[in-house]
Image (tube, helix red, strand yellow):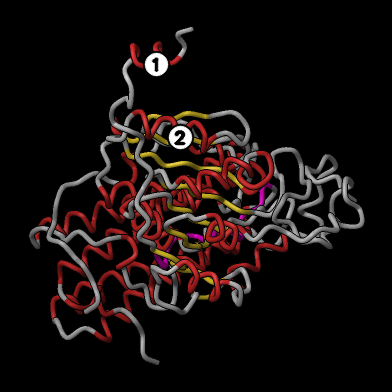
Amino acid sequence: MDTHLTEAAAGPTPQDYKSDVKPIWCPGCGDYSVLAGITRAMATMGLERHNTAVVSGIGCSSRIPAYTSCYGYHAVHGRALAVASGLKLARPDLAVLVFGGDGDGFSIGGNHFLHACRRNVDMTYIVMDNQVYGMTKGQASPTTESDWCESKLTPEGPGVNPIQPVQLALACGANFVARGFSGNPNEVARLIVEGVKHPGFSVIHVLSPCVTFRPEQRTWKSTVHPYGREPTDDPNEAMRAVLEDDGFGLGIFLAGNRRPFQPASAASRTIAQIEEGFAV
Amino acid sequence: MKTKVLNGAANVGLFLAHALELENEAAERYEELADSMEAHNNVEVATLFRDLAGYSRKHAAEVKQVAAEHGPVPKVAPWEFQWDSTTESPEAAGFEHAHYLMKPHHALTMALLSETQGNTYYASVAAETKDPEVARLARAFAEEEAQHVTLVRKWLERYPAPKDGWDDDPDPPNISD
């Protein structure tokens, strides 16, 4: 039997990682299930709450830190990865998980995303993608289709091609890239566990429907499908395969072997040596 | 039809681990739905989901008691549960069916689907297992789920489908029309 079942252990439960704050997402929002996946992953790994940091940006999905019982930081719009990078480099002993949405991650925080991928700091970024700015009442986001005409701001559609998060992550050097779907929180939990365990920067793209502003996304449940390939450690191979993906393939695309970024452990020069360089 | 209940049908420990997960996930989901309905001031449906969560918690406690009589329940990673035809625990109500203006009829329809799936799961285990004790427990749990199905059907008689327009909102969140 293809399982890794372990004997009973009175470890933490998903409930232990939930705070007393009740989510205020819309009923039917995919983010509820992502939260379930997150807490199940945390319980499975037995993460110590006092040694786990949950960092987010701004948006519906960025409310996650309030709903977990770990240390949390609700950062500035688009800057979650910058905050999280600094935290992980200052406190490498912490497990750092970063959460956000498609607008926060690929528009306002797009630049940080590119450089977080290439820097490869050992942390995990979970992007809940609903292809819309929900918190501000439904404007086109960087992942919205070019012909989506349901916003007054873009009555004829955004007119530009959407960003492909998985392709972008691969192109910029993320070391672990996967895609999940909120309708299967247990699989999301597996991807998070794999991502956290994998050294370096892990990107987990989670399709999470916005039932209020993109009600047609309720059909994603029947649109998603297994990616159907074994994960590779070769980014080129992963990219070639992903170029043929329709954006709804679920699974692990890349589990690479780049060495995570490590800051120099000691200063390369003393203060006195630096001062010598400024002597006139 | 070949089902995929291997894990849960394998032995008593794994079966009870599945049963506990099934009931806990069902209760959790109902509670989340109740919370979200409260947040949107849909008190009637929130109360209904809260009641359904209570029943699931009660059933989880019963399963826990049975489990205590059978020794330690193995720990199973979330993605290693095998639920036959559903990706989630069969009794976890589908979030995608929720709506902030939904009526008791919709909530009960969701519950009917969940309870039916729970019944089907236990019946599948009972039919497939080679372990007589698993078969006995699975039959008993299937019977209990069947009673829940009957109960929800009776409730549904009190709450017929609302007329079209139940989701009309004079102040909708989406003003793109």
**Mark 2–mark 1 distance (CA, rounded to whole Å):** 30 Å
Q: Which residue is mark 2?
A: A84
Task: Point out the tag, 2 or 1, that comes first from the N-terminus.
Answer: 2
> In which quadrant is the N terminus of chain B drawn?
bottom left
Q: Which residues are magenta?
A: B89-100
Mark 1 belongs to chain? A
Q: Is residue A271 left or right of residue A33?
A: left
Residue B109 in sight here: yes
Between B43 and A182, the residue placed more toward the observer is A182
Residue depicted at 61% across the width and 53% down the height: A129
Most extreme residue toward the front, as rendered? A280
* The quadrant where residue B156 appears: bottom right
- Report if residue B96 lies within the magenta region: yes
Q: Give the quadrant of residue A113.
A: top right
Q: Could you tell me if residue B49 is visible in this image?
A: no
User: Is A124 situated above or below B137?
Assistant: above
Amino acid, disc 1: Ile
Packing grade of label 2 (10 A; few <14, some 14-19, many >=20) is many
List the single residue furthest toward the bottom.
Answer: B1
Image position of B137 (left or right of A69): left
Tell me, yes or no, whether dots 2 and 1 are on the same chain. Answer: yes
Identity of the residue drawn at 65% across and 54% down: A130
Residue that label 1 marks: A274
State yes or no: discs 2 and 1 in contact (Cβ < 8 Å): no
Q: Is residue B113 magenta?
A: no
Question: In the rendered structure, which amino acid carries the disc numbered 2?
Answer: Ala
Residue A152's spot in the image, x, y percent? 89, 47
Q: Position of residue A162 (x, y in %)?
A: 73, 59
